[in-house]
Amino acid sequence: MLVFKSVVVQYSGKIVGLLVSLVSLGLLTRYLGVSAYGQYATVIAIAGTVVTLSDFGFFWSTIHHLNDQTDRLRVLKEIAALKFLLTAGLLIAGGLFVEFGH
């Protein structure tokens, strides 16, 4: 019964999220218009790409290295620095694409 409740709660949340997305889509397209909504959609797509690419497997790498290393703080600092640099580079590249890509 616990699994059933968990599944019902999870799918209820997904349905609520879907409904909120549909309502916000309607409001955004009416309020922004075609051109501004296109710019909004471009920014959201680039942000999603940056988030996906910036992970770049660092989560699993962190878990793997934390299990193998004794100096865990050093490992966390190095991985955080690499992830920050990669994310900053992707944000700069995305900004340049938006600015000069059209």
Image (tube, rainbow, N blue to C red):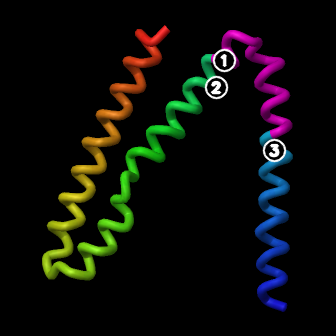
Q: Which residue is mark 3?
A: 20
Residue shown at the point (24%, 65%) measured from the top left: 76
Q: CA distance from mark 2 to mark 3?
A: 17 Å
In terms of secondary structure, what is the magenta stretch mainly?
A: helix
> Badge 2: how crowded within 10 Å, few (<14), some, or many (20+)?
few
Q: CA distance from mark 2 to mark 1?
A: 5 Å
Closer mark to the observer between disc 3 and disc 1:
1
| Amino acid identity at mark 3 | Val
| Amino acid identity at mark 1 | Gly
Number of numbered discs present?
Answer: 3
Numbered range of the magenta stretch: 22-38
**Where is 55 relative to 47, above or below?**
below
| Label 2 with label 1: CB-CB less than 8 Å | yes
Residue 66 horizontal/vertical position (percent): 26, 76
Residue 12 painted magenta = no
Query: Element under label 2?
Result: helix
Q: Which residue is mark 1?
A: 38
On screen, residue 98 versus residue 59, left or right, reads right
Q: Which residue is mark 2?
A: 41
Residue shown at the point (49%, 38%) measured from the top left: 49
Residue shown at the point (26%, 81%) measured from the top left: 67
Q: Nearer the viewer, residue 27 or 43?
A: 43
Residue 24 horizontal/vertical position (percent): 79, 34
| Amino acid identity at mark 2 | Ala
Query: Element under label 3?
Result: helix
Residue 13 horizontal/vertical position (percent): 79, 61
